[in-house]
Image (spheres, rainbow, N blue to C red):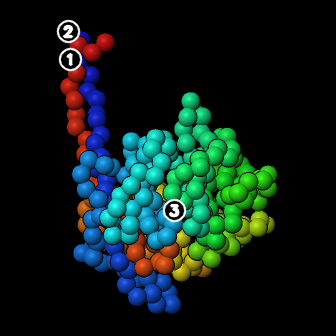
Amino acid sequence: MEAPDLRTAAHEAAHIVHQRAGHAPAGGLDPLADGAQARQLTSGEQIFNAIVSGPSGKILAAAVNGDLWMMNADGSEKTVVFPQAHNLFSVSSCGERYLVFDRYLDGKIELWRTDADGTNAVKRLDEVEFSTCSADGKWIYFVVKDKLYRLPPEGGAPTEVLSVPGTPRAWMVRGSPDGNRIAFLYQEGEPIPKTKLAVASGDGGPLQFTIPLSIGSAGLAWAPSGKALQYLLTRNGATNVWEQPLIGGEPRQVTNFPSGRIFDFAWSREGRQLLLTKGNQSSDVILIRNFR
């Protein structure tokens, strides 16, 4: 008899929660203690892997089954606004008028735009994975290999904003709360490239800020103040939000959840509520006998 084959099956269950922030002193937000203020907004079988602030104060979320959902800020009136979007990388709201997201169709990644209610879907570009809308809704920023571009959501030709340094790829593109800057992640260095965080003007020009990120970091969002960038870091089985000030210095922990995984996060537009897709991940070891 041949040796058995051991394989691991991972299981995830991520639901949407929100946590209200404390007051905002000059240095940024107070630490969000231990999750006691967090409130779960979704439950049941629907699992969400991406979340952003949507139009009209709503929450826009991507489900693992491919649907795009909209719901009120308290989790009520959940509605599928675009079924089978097959969204993999980015989803955002362009002001109050449009939704922008990537779709995986027929083996290709495409950039699509719909009205705020999910109607009037239009494919805008091919081969675009990561994109974001500026806070004022005037621009869609996106990356293609080592170039960052922008174009109006209504249409028109893309214009190049800047060239990404280092390895020919950028990801996690995010627009600042004031709409004037863009942040993204990229890799640079030899022989083992390091992931770095970068900030540039939305109009182009040299990078204004770069700093290496901790190994294992994930996600990216602007702090509501616009003075820092935030990311996810998992330590001892618990994921929390961390913050890197743009003036430099050491990163600081923003949330203090003692357990559970955070898969994505975003701030409400007014910067008072932190939205999370949070849950658990478990792995089962499966014994397959006589596997060939």
Residue 146: x %, y % from top left: 71, 49
Q: Indicate whether 66 appears above or below 207.
A: above
Q: Nearer the viewer, residue 272 or 77?
A: 77
Q: Is residue 217 left or right of residue 164?
A: left
Q: Amino acid at mark 3?
A: Leu
Q: Are marks 3 and 2 in contact (CB under 8 Å)?
A: no
Specify few, some or many for label 2: CA neighbours under 10 Å numbering under 14, 14-19, or 20 or more: few
Whether residue 229 is visible here, answered yes or no, is no
Q: Secondary structure at mark 2?
A: loop
Q: Earlier in the sequence, mark 3 or mark 1?
A: 3
Q: Amino acid at mark 1?
A: Arg
Q: Is residue 168 left or right of residue 282?
A: right
Q: Earlier in the sequence, mark 3 or mark 2?
A: 2
Q: Which residue is under mark 1?
A: 289
Residue 173 figure quarter: bottom right
Residue found farthest to the top: 1
Q: Nearer the viewer, residue 126 or 231?
A: 126
Q: Are marks 1 and 2 in contact (CB under 8 Å)?
A: yes
Residue 190: assigned label: none
Q: Is residue 288 left or right of residue 176?
A: left
Q: Residue at x 26, y 27 (%)?
A: 6
Q: Which residue is under mark 3?
A: 220
Q: Are marks 3 and 1 in contact (CB under 8 Å)?
A: no
Residue 50 figure quarter: bottom left
Considering the image in quadrants, where does the N terminus appear? top left
The Cα–Cα distance between marks 3 and 1, rounded to whole angstroms, is 43 Å
